[in-house]
Amino acid sequence: MVEEEAKTLPMELREKQGVENNGFVQNEAFDDKESNTSSEDEIPKPCAVNVDPTAMEEPVLKPYVGMPKEVLLQFSSQARYRVTREILFWLIIAAAVVLVCATIAIIALSPKCLDWWQAGPVYQIYPRSFKDSDMDGNGDLKGIQDKLDHITYLNIKTIWLTSFFKSPLKDLGYGAEDFYDVDPMFGSMTDFENLLAAIHDRGLKVIMDLIPNHTSNKHQWFQLSRNWTGKYTDYYIWRDCARTAGSITPPNNWVSVFGNSSWQWDSVRNQCYYHQFGKEQPDLNFRSLAVQQEINDIIKFWLGKGIDGFSFGSVKFLLEATHLRDEPQVNKSQKPESITAYSQLYHDYTTTQVGMHDIIRGFRQTMNQFSNEPGRYRFMGSDADEKEDVEAVMMYYGTAFVQEADFPFNFNLINMKNLSGNSVFEAVDLWMKNMPLRKWPNWVVGSPNVARISSRIGKEYVNVMNMLLLTLPGTPVTYYGEEIGMGNIVSENVSDPVTSPEKSPMQWDGQVNGGFTEGNSSWLPVNSDYHSVNVEIQMSLSNSTLNLYRELTSLRSNELPLQRGWMCYVWNDSNVFVYVRELDGLDRVFMMVLNFGQESMIDLQALVPNLPSEATVRLSTNFSSAGRAVNTKMVKTEMGEGLVLEYKTAEPVHTMEAFQANCFVSEKACYSSAFDLLYVSC
């Protein structure tokens, strides 16, 4: 029965197209056949299995997490992955190139942020007259430190100290006896270092005067030079003078700024030395490289102390012609021997000689060595009072390739011969139209060598002059006391009326000597009006000159158009000067209407197309007017009144074709018209 089942099983498998498994059958014949492998007939024939063909193919491999490197490389070489990868690579490269180009374009086209010497007003201090701390009647460095709160109250950014070098104090101390020391009248070097630290602690900057043209005749260099000592022999300008019957005949007709011959006989050297100013102030010989190096060493010394910059004075006198020819007379018919005044000659051979600017640029290069640290740029100003030659003044800015002064100080508003809307416009326009492209303007309305505003043009114009100063583009410079409207004094004790036009000590309060000193007296008498014109009382009065000054400096620091926007002239006549300050990207405009004459009525709508019918008085010299709306068709101003009007418009003046020639800008804020985006951080 079993054998029958075994015999029938292969048949059933064959019928079912299966596979016969002879391994289950014990058969000797099969064993014999298996041992004879040489015969094809004996090789087992393959048999078919009923399997789906698709199941016989290798499974498709897909990417999976954690696949080994060999598998990953199989996929990376496939076209669909390779092309995608290359597309992404080139897109990243293109995006990087676009980003770099956009960055370069933004840097190239956008103006730089304002530096510290551009960001706010400069406050000039004559130390002897600011504050006395030791009751000797003379102001000093400690006194300045005691009054730094006043500086910050005014929103001042930079303090400008006039000369405090050790000197005989002739000509306000501008003939130094020692450039490396502080005059004992003002304190010690330690006092200076403490003052400097206190100024910097308040986030302020300080610049100082340096007059390189001359020294005191008590300077060690002069003493060595007059004795023919070594290299100092030619540190000064010495020439032989003819001596006849006890009288001295100078080498030529050159005249001192203070009058009379600029040559002085020295009995020690038996020669004459040259002095552009007082006879106690001999001129240095800047054709000597050793002298130039001495001045550069002085610059390095004070910059090393931490000074933030210098104002170089009297630089146009640095060189004189070596031929020593007589200078031309203004009046050809005048007898040569009668010439004693500086104004009687044309100073062709004693000012602005060839090579003078090279020396100043040398000063600049020395200062640049200290300007490499971030935030420690060292400012350089120059005194270039060329009243009749504006082109000569502009040369002190340097060129597009060679840096010189950051700006020459601008005395146009001081040099006006009369006051009117027209004269103020002419003074402003003269500077703006001649200033080199992308340079920074500045405005000075007071200095140690001129009368105060109230004494020069009248008390009624002090406020409007300060309003002009603080709303023009550029850096405003205020001389101490002008923020409260101080005036000159008349005193018989003024030792040198030529160079010290009776400017009394600072008036701090209504106490004796105006709070300047607690001593019995001051080196100059305090003005008799100190009871009503002083800092303390004006701080308490909302409509005071002091608080108007402070409001103007605050407005300037908070409003971008006043910091760095366009200025466009709108109108000027004998009474008023009108201009606007505006900025690309802002619809807010400030219009200044300043009266420097008599009462005036002006129709602004007739002057500016599409001007709004009303504007708001943002500030006024008459505080009661602030905040009110005015009809722009009828704007009235009294004598000496100033208005800062504010309005909104979609058509700023600087975009109007009619005003193109009357608009100026030095440093615009970054603005993109494509995105209507204003970058206000600058």
Image (cartoon, rainbow, N blue to C red):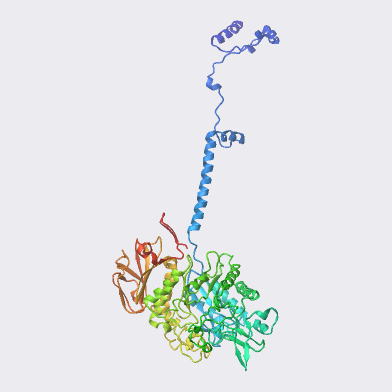
Asked whether residue 368 is in view, the answer is: yes
Snapshot quadrant of residue 349:
bottom right
Q: In this view, does 485 lie above or below 646?
A: below
Residue reaching furthest to the bottom: 245
Which residue is nearer to you in this view: 554 or 224?
224
Which residue is nearer to you in this view: 444 or 543?
444
Which residue is nearer to you in this view: 500 or 184?
500
Left or right placement of residue 523 versus residue 427 in this view: right
Left or right placement of residue 529 versus residue 162 in this view: left
Snapshot quadrant of residue 461:
bottom left
Image quadrant where one finds the N terminus: top right
Residue 640: horizontal and vertical position, in percent?
Answer: 36, 79
Residue 503: horizontal and vertical position, in percent?
Answer: 48, 85
Q: Which residue is drawn at 49% across and 89% down?
A: 525
Q: Residue at x 68, y 6 (%)?
A: 29
Residue reaching furthest to the front: 333
Asked whether residue 155 is in view, the answer is: no
Residue 604: horizontal and vertical position, in percent?
Answer: 31, 69
Which residue is nearer to you in this view: 87 or 311?
311
